[in-house]
Amino acid sequence: MIHYDLKKYNIRSRQGYGKYFAHTRRRETMDLTAIEEMVEHSCSVTRADVRAVLSALYDGVKTLLQDGHVVDLGEFGRFYISVTSVGVERTEDWNQQRHITGFQLNYTPERHHDHLRGGHYLTRPMLKGCRARRDKEKENLK
């Protein structure tokens, strides 16, 4: 269950000024140890086994991404790295050291081909069945 409260948007220069919007109330962060324990309790592998697999998965995905591959992890989605840069007027002005400013890790939700609609569409299996609940007692609506 995703909990939210209402917050008033107070930036005068923006279109939503003065309106109330849903604001997600995040719960505590679940770290890798907590996830390992959760998996250990739901199947026959130990926490150490889960850690070993996740560590190997991380190393493999990182290597593939940095070699320029798109990594498709099924229901988790697809990951790829893109380059960020500043523009130049002419190609002969390009200097990689000066103009490449960094890298971004990009994520795309799972994609399926829909034969009836004749194209691709994105699915978000991790959001399927998600519900929200307003926490009125946590709100400060002033």
Image (cartoon, helix red, strand yellow):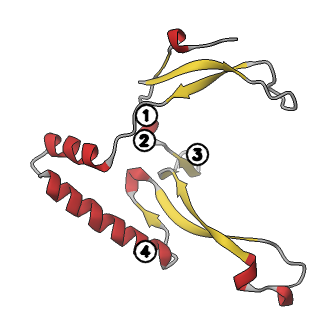
Q: Residue at x 42, y 40 (%)?
A: 126
Mark nearer the viewer, 1 or 4 = 4
Give neighbour class at mark 2: few <14, some 14-19, many 20+ (Cα, 10 Å).
few
Mark nearer the viewer, 4 or 2 = 4
Give me the C-alpha separation between circle 2 and circle 1. 5 Å
Report if the CB atoms under discs 2 and 1 are less than 8 Å apart: yes
Q: Residue at x 20, y 44 (%)?
A: 37
Work out which residue is located at the far left of the displayed protein and give it: 44
Kindly identify which residue carries mark 3.
117
Give me the C-alpha separation between circle 1 and circle 4. 29 Å
Give me the C-alpha separation between circle 3 and circle 1. 21 Å
In this picture, is 66 found above or below 105?
A: below
Q: Amino acid at mark 4?
A: Leu
Question: Which label is found at residue 64?
Answer: 4
Q: Nearer the viewer, residue 57 or 119?
A: 57
* Residue 109 drawn at (x, y percent): 50, 50
